Every structure is written in C-alpha cells, then in structure tokens.
C-alpha cells in the first residue's frame, strides 16, 4: 500500500469514528432521560478536550512522541471508552466515558493532519485528496444506523441508536492497529531556547491576519457545530424517517468529496480569502433554506452545501496553517485552531443552540425553526463580511495568492 493510500485510509477511519456517533447523539440522550443541562455538558466534552489538548497532548505530539504511536495509543483508549458508552445508561458514567474518549480523540484530528502534511509533497494540491478520505469515512458511518433501525419498533429505537457507539468503538480499535503501519513521523525538536510549542503557535495571533482568521473561525465553528445540534431533530420533526436521517445528512459529505477534489484548483484560482468567503456563505444559504422551506426534496438538495462549507473553509484553514506556521509548531497550531473548531466553537454551539431551541419551543413542544435558523444565517453573513474587509494575508514564499 503506497503512502498516500495509507494516509487516505487513516482519514477514512479517523472520521468514521466521529461520524458514527455525533449526528444521533442529541437524539439518543433525551431517550436516556438526560436533562437539557446534562445534554449540553456531555456535548461540551469535545470543548473540554480541545482546551486541555492545546496545552498538553499537542505539545507532546509536536515535541516528544512519534505521531503514529501517539495516534495508536489514543485510539486504543478511545475505542474502549466508546464501547463502554454502549452500556452506559446513567449520566455520570456516560459523561465520564465521553470525556475520556474526547480527551484522546480530539488531539488525533490535529495529529492526522500533521502526519498527512509531513508525508505529502504539495499540500495545496494533495491534502484535499487525502483529507477526502475523512469525508468518505463520515459518509460510510451514516449507513450502519440506517440498516440497524430498519423495521425496529418504536419501543426498541433507543437500543438500536446506541449501537453506533459499538460501531465507532470497533473502528477506533482498527485505527489503533493500522496506525502502526503509517509512515514514521518523528517529533520535531524545538529551536534553541523554545520549549512550549503551543505558546509559540499562539504568539502568531499578534499578526492581524491570523487574529482575524481566529475570530472568524470561532464564528464559523459555532455555526458548524450548531448544525449537528439542531439538524437531526429538525429533520425528524418535518417528517423524515428516523433511519433515513443520517443518510440524508451524509449527502453533504458526498458533496464534500467532490469539493475536496477541486479545493486545490479553487485555492489557486480564488486565493485564500475568496475561498473562505464561499465556505462561510454556504452556511448562510443552507440555514436560510431550512428556515423557509420544509420540502423534503429541497432539504436533501441543500445538504450539498455542507461540502462547500467544510472544504472551502475548515480544510482551507488547515492548509493555510501548514503554509504560514513553522514546522516545529504546526501540530500545536492545528490544535490552536481546533481549540475553536472543536472546543470553544463547539461549547458556544451547545450553550447557544440548546437554550435557543428551548426558547423557541412552545408548550406543545412545537419548535419555531424559522426563527431559530435565522440566528446562524445572520452569523454566517457577518463572518463573511469580516473576511472580506479584514483578512489580508501576505503571499507565501511560493507566491500563493491571497
């Protein structure tokens, strides 16, 4: 198996794990009797993990351990925690296991990016294709639940949904073993007098264009994570079959595959700023359609925008980091932005969209989705304006367009 194929498979398994359990999580937790506060706290596990990760695990990955070994250990522990989640039915064990999984999983997102960047020749051209494996993994993760829930009586629906934790756990254990076959990616020693990779990465926030990107990433991450809080219940509410919801949501990942294939060309032709603006505006368009149209065919079609949202903004941010940060802190720089994408942004999404949903729910438990979805629509439009007016990165050494 050649190196690029191994990196592709790594990404498939990496995002299969996450894609298996995240979309149905906020449908599973009410069935277990968890309160709104408990659901928000469990949903904040990724945020807690990303905050801890920027100070500890990413530092180790940059400076102390071979990346592929760190990946193997993390998924061994995380896989065991996911299997435990299948059996957990009360709040504290469930929260503890989700937190353990998150603590070891979140750093691996930065680490898989770093392994990929370290073993490809032209990141702007090749990373989109390698990262497309993650999109494929997310798509594949949507289908086990579809087959598991086919014909399942309403009384047994919760047990069927919970099997996603077993599926994700097995995938994590497989990736743990597969990680040891990946190219050796040794730690990068610090420059003389430097010890804290995260501190050096954070110092780049003094640059105005990095600071602007940091703020916009927080806004976009809040919208992106909010999508996973509100969309599954919304699709159920407007009449989609329970077993079909994850496949419907996976349409966005199918589009993401195609978008990843053209990402390198888009960056070359449009530059960083325009590419990111298109990605952010994809959120505004999708939530605007959600707000004003409940036709199933239109809802399925607009899921295509998810691919544009992710590839043209988040994948572009990861490539941008590789282009603008020094080699010895790139994992920590990835972690710094993952602090927003998976951490603070995720935290904001849970504590914004869960209470917002409750505030727009009447006494008969009918949600005013039109009013709810106008929030992320307005946020996305504001983020696009900020990029257009304030994000002006210099050309890279290879002359990449801004």
Image: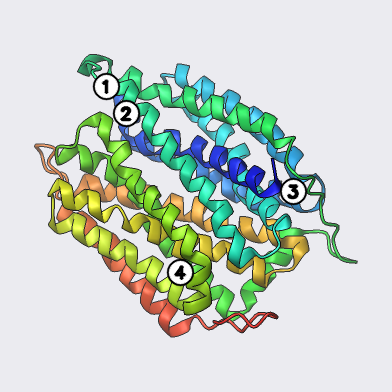
Q: How is the image coloured?
A: rainbow
Q: Secondary structure at mark 3?
A: helix
* Residues at discs 1 and 3 in contact (Cβ within 8 Å): no
Q: Which residue is mark 3?
A: 61
Q: Is residue 207 above or below residue 172?
A: below
Mark identifier at residue 150: 1
Q: Earlier in the sequence, mark 2 or mark 3?
A: 3
x%, y% of residue 201? 69, 65
**Which of the two marks, 1 or 3, is nearer to us in this view?**
1
Whether residue 366 is visible, yes or no, is yes
Which quarter of the rendering shows the C terminus? bottom right
Mark identifier at residue 216: 4
90 left or right of 235 in image: right
Q: Is residue 231 above or below residue 282?
A: above
Q: CA distance from mark 1 to mark 4?
A: 41 Å
Whether residue 354 is visible, yes or no, is no
x%, y% of residue 361? 16, 44
* Residues at discs 2 and 1 in contact (Cβ within 8 Å): yes
Q: CA distance from mark 2 to mark 1?
A: 6 Å
* Residues at discs 4 and 3 in contact (Cβ within 8 Å): no
The 10 Å Cα crowd at callout 4, few under 14, some 14 to 19, many 20 or more, is: many
**Which of the two marks, 2 or 4, is nearer to us in this view?**
2
Q: Residue at x 27, y 59 (%)?
A: 286
Q: Secondary structure at mark 2?
A: helix
Give the camera-side residue of 180 and 100.
Answer: 180
Q: Which residue is mark 2?
A: 146
Q: Residue at x 45, y 72 (%)?
A: 275
| Quarter of the rendering containing residue 312 | bottom left
x%, y% of residue 149? 29, 22
The 10 Å Cα crowd at callout 2, few under 14, some 14 to 19, many 20 or more, is: some
């Amino acid at each position: 198996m050649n190196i690029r194929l191994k990196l592709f498979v790594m990404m498939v398994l990496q995002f299969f794990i996450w894609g298996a359990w995240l979309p149905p999580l906020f449908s599973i937790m009410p069935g277990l009797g968890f309160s709104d506060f408990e659901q928000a706290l469990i949903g904040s596990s990724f945020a807690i993990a990303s905050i801890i990760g920027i100070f500890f695990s990413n530092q180790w990955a940059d400076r102390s351990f071979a990346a592929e070994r760190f990946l193997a250990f993390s998924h061994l522990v995380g896989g065991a925690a996911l299997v435990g989640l299948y059996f957990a039915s009360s709040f504290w064990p469930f929260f503890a296991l989700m937190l353990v999984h998150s603590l070891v999983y979140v750093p691996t997102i930065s680490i898989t990016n770093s392994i990929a960047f370290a073993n490809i020749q032209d990141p702007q051209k090749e990373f989109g294709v390698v990262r497309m494996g993650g999109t494929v993994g997310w798509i594949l993760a949507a289908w086990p639940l579809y087959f598991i829930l086919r014909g399942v009586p309403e009384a047994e629906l919760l047990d069927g949904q919970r099997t996603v934790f077993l599926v994700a756990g097995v995938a994590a254990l497989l990736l743990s073993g597969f990680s040891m076959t990946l190219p050796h990616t040794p730690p990068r020693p610090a420059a003389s007098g430097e010890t804290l990779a995260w501190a050096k990465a954070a110092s780049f926030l003094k640059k105005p264009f990095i600071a602007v990107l940091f703020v916009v990433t927080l806004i976009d991450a809040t919208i992106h994570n909010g999508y996973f809080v509100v969309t599954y219940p919304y699709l159920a509410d407007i009449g989609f079959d329970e077993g079909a919801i994850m496949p419907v949501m996976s349409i966005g990942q199918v589009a993401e595959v195609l978008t990843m294939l053209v990402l390198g060309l888009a960056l070359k032709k449009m530059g960083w700023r325009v590419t990111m603006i298109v990605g952010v505006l994809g959120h505004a368009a999708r939530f605007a359609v959600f707000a004003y149209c409940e036709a199933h065919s239109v809802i399925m079609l607009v899921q295509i925008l998810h691919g544009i949202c992710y590839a043209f903004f988040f994948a572009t941010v990861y490539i941008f980091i590789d282009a603008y940060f020094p080699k010895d802190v790139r994992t920590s720089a990835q972690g710094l932005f993952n602090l927003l994408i998976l951490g603070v942004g995720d935290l904001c999404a849970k504590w914004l969209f869960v209470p917002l949903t409750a505030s727009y729910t009447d006494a008969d438990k009918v949600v005013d989705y039109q009013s709810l979805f106008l929030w992320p629509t307005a946020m996305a439009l504001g983020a696009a304006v900020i990029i257009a007016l304030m994000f002006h990165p210099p050309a890279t050494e290879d002359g990449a367009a801004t």
